[in-house]
Amino acid sequence: MSEPDLNNTILATEIDSTEALEQISTLVAKIPQAYLPKLLQMIRLFREIVVVEQESSVYAKLIAFSQLPQEERVKRNQAAIALLNSWVEEGDEQEQKETWEILNQALNESGVSI
């Protein structure tokens, strides 16, 4: 089996995360140690940019929602409440607790509260 050509440009959607991690590991292993601190800085900067993009996306969605007519906001809120109520009625208790913990954590991380 030949080594993949890691210099080719591949769209992120064309490979799964496991393969991407393998390719990253292979590339990092080939970088001289003297350059690793700079690589670490680039990775940290990338993470900061991704977090800011995610936060601004959430914020933009909240702004867009707040600009909807009140009738539409009420309708969407009622639909969300109905969905949550259906989950309470359908799922088992342990699954509901786990789901709530995940939702609550996601809300806390994004700065949104309910």
Image (spheres, rainbow, N blue to C red):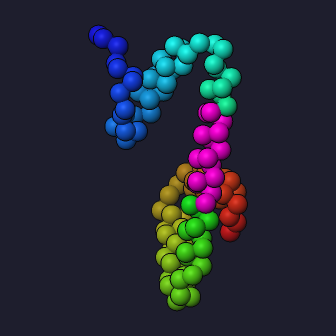
Q: Determine whether 111 is above or below 101 in the image.
A: below
Q: Determine whether 95 is above or below 68 in the image.
A: above
Quadrant into which the N terminus falls: top left
Q: Is residue 4 visible?
A: yes
Quarter occupied by residue 43: top right
Instruction: State the residue at coordinates (66%, 26%).
Output: 38
**Quick one: 67 or 8, which is closer to the camera?**
8
- In the rendered image, residue 3, in percent from the top left (x then y), is placed at 35, 13
35 on left or right of 91: right
Quadrant into which the C terminus falls: bottom right
- In the rendered image, residue 84, in percent from the top left (x then y), is placed at 54, 67
**Quick one: 31 or 59, which is closer to the camera?**
31
Q: Which residues are magenta?
A: 42-56
**Does the magenta portion include 50?**
yes
**Does the magenta portion include 80?**
no
Q: As drawn, which residue projects farthest toward the left?
A: 1
80 on left or right of 108: left
Instruction: State the residue at coordinates (70%, 60%).
Output: 111
Q: How many marks?
A: 0
Q: Determine whether 102 is above or below 36 in the image.
A: below
- In the rendered image, residue 110, in percent from the top left (x then y), is placed at 66, 57
Instruction: State the residue at coordinates (68%, 64%).
Output: 112
**Quick one: 42 or 109, which is closer to the camera?**
42
Quarter occupied by residue 64: bottom right
Instruction: State the residue at coordinates (51%, 63%).
Output: 87
